[in-house]
Amino acid sequence: MRNLAEYFAMGGYAVYVWPSYAAAVAVLIGVLIASLRSLRARSAELEAIEGSLPHRSREERPT
């Protein structure tokens, strides 16, 4: 148990290390959320664009 406490104390630098980890995790979560929102918005935009195009039959499609 003492080794675990020493690990979490980080040799006296825990005051600097753990907030740095927390900040990095917060930034990564923020980037993930922003990316997912952007993906959803672009997907909706693509569906709207594809929905506004005239529908072509197989014979009319270029090969």
Image: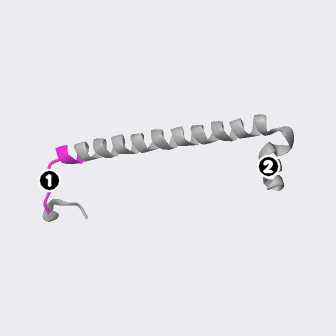
User: Which percent across, then down, holds residue 8?
Assistant: 77, 47
Q: Amino acid at mark 1?
A: His
Q: How is the image coloured?
A: one colour
Density class for disc 2 (Cα within 10 Å; few <14, some 14-19, many ≥20) is few
Question: In this figure, which residue is indicated by the disc labeled 1?
Answer: 55
Q: Would you say residue 19 sits in the magenta stretch? A: no
Q: Main secondary structure of the magenta part?
A: loop
In the image, the segment drawn in magenta is 50-57
Instruction: Please tell me which residue lies in front, 5 or 60.
Output: 5
Residue at 72 percent across and 40 percent down: it is 18
Image side of residue 40 versus residue 32, left or right = left
- Foreground: 51 or 60? 51
Q: Quadrant of residue 28?
A: top right
Q: Residue 63's spot in the image, x, y percent? A: 25, 65
> Is residue 54 covered in magenta?
yes
Could you say which is closer to the camera, residue 54 or residue 50?
A: 50
Q: Is residue 53 left or right of residue 5?
A: left
Q: Position of residue 51 (x, y in %)?
A: 19, 47
